[in-house]
Image: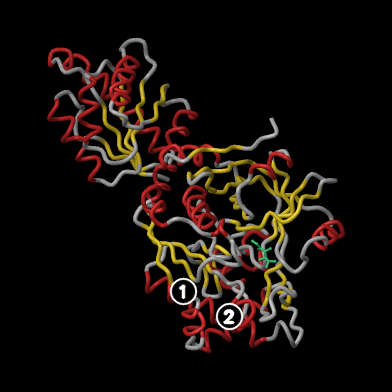
Amino acid sequence: MARIGVISFSDGRDYVHDGIRDFIATTEDKLVDRLTAAGHEVVRGKEIVATNTGASAVARQVAAAGVDLTVFHYAVWAFPHFTMLAAGATPGPLLLLSNIDPVQPGMVGMLAGGGALDQIGRVHTRLWGDPDERALIDKIGVQATASSAVASLRGSTFGRIGGRPMGMNTAVANTDQWQSVFGVDVEEIDQWEIVRRSELADQKEVTRAREWLETNAAGVHYDGKKLTPELLERQIRSYLAMRELIDEWNLDFSGIKGQPEMTQYFATMDIVEAFLNDPYDWNGPKETHVCATEADMDGALTMQLLKHIARTPVLFADVRHYHADRDIWDLCNSGQHATWYAARSDDPAENLSKVHFYPEVFFFPAGGASVHHLAAPGQMTLARLTRRGGNYRMHLMLGDFETYDDETNAQLMRQSTFEWPHAFARLDAKADDFLSRFGANHIHAVPGDHRAEVRAACELLGVELDEFTRG
Ligand SMILES: C[C@H](O)[C@@H](O)[C@@H](O)C(=O)CO
């Protein structure tokens, strides 16, 4: 849940303010109470704003508490220049909220304040209603979550391990644009660092990790060639190397090039990417670390935003195949999905009991394990940042992951690459529309309907929305 500032505005005539102070305080009490009950932390202005100096001082006090979103609250007619002064002292996102009680002209106060902000180009959102309506409190929560997700990007660092894979332009972004639009810095690290550090990994932990995978997975299918205990250990060592790089370089999220150098001459990075994206490893629960296959920068950025909105692991997948007869898509990555998606359980054993580690397929001569499973069913939000003519746009849609009987699942998975992970997605998008417009080979997903938060985040970022729907 988010940290929300609340500042109430009043009339600048002292004799009017004296008469309405209690009314404002009562409505503010109710708003704060309902936001707190919804799980948010609320930072209240130290006084109701009724003077110019008060406007700046109260806004500075609320901003200093590090709020995700500041609600300007209009229960009465309020002098609009107080709004302007307070906005000037509020660096974060603003939401103007008016009550709908006809006893006092709060709506007029909000429109006058909002109009003044429009005149100076200060972006804000507006809401109106009674805090007793759950829908209103939820809408404020959506804005606060989006604000906090956008704020979490600013000042963060993406670790780009290796460069553009296999000529994939959609995996490479402009670092100046990342800094100016999203506030994200990029640390370039050579893949050699994974190789070098993997050799130094602690053998005790490597053995323990391999045994944990062997014990908990549905199967580790050693074949003596492409998947041996030594190759699996090399992948585990690579995971430990990445953890060191993340700690040493303070990386918030990352991507690994993988192909072709690692996949031809060392090992695939599938174990690494799966368990970085997972909320656990053999050492127990941990924070997820978004890591994109093929060092896909805009993919990783989409995932990092989704992570902060949904607070779950995020799926990374190729848009691999459209089963036209069933109207479903096989979202299948070239080796890994976070294992959490197999059952979406808090218990790793439950997820891993549905995961098979298979020898890598012919694309990847160096071998290692691919992480095979089928994503559990449920409603998903699917999204992807892409660029058109140099400008960012966010593709966004709802979908349902589906599963069928075992025989059908296997038959469908065998049509693409069985050994890789799959998600059968019924998208709320017409296939023709999707294939004509979607600007990348990778797509990302989180459970539930988070479109409202993604829309709000795009608004804050100034990123164009490109929504798909059949409707
Ligand atoms: C087969 C290739 O090597 C895969 O990596 C390719 O299908 C992709 O994943 C492209 O994103």
- Name of the residue lying farthest toward the top: 103
* Relative height, residue 116 to residue 161 (above, below): above
Left or right of 195 on screen, residue 100: left
Residue at 42% from the left image edge and 69% from the top image edge: 188
Is ligand 1 closer than 8 angstroms to the Cβ of mark 2?
A: no
Q: Which mark is residue 243?
A: 1
Question: Residue 169 is drawn in which quadrant?
Answer: bottom right
Regarding residue 279, the answer to whether it shows in the image is no
Measured from the top left, where is residue 256 in percent x and y? 53, 69
Location of residue 341 with respect to 15 vertically, above or below? below
Badge 2 density bin: few <14, some 14–19, many ≥20, Cα 10 Å: some
Q: Quadrant of residue 457?
A: top left
Considering the numbered disc 1 on the image, is that residue within a helix, a strand or a loop?
helix
Q: Which residue is mark 2?
A: 209
Lower sequence index among marks 1 and 2 = 2
Rendering coords of residue 365 (x, y %): 69, 80
Identify the disc placed on residue 394: none
Q: Amino acid at mark 1?
A: Arg
Q: How dense is the environment of label 1, judged by Cα within 10 Å: few (below 14), some, or many (20 and up)? A: some
Quadrant observed for ligand 1 in the rendered image: bottom right
Q: Is residue 22 visible?
A: yes
Residue at 63 percent of width and 63 percent of height: 337
Q: Nearer the viewer, residue 97 or 359?
A: 359
Task: Estimate the x, y position of residue 221 in percent, counting from the top left.
Answer: 75, 79
Q: Amino acid at mark 2?
A: Ala
Specify the quadrant of the image occupied by residue 100: top left
Q: Nearer the viewer, residue 122 or 24?
A: 122
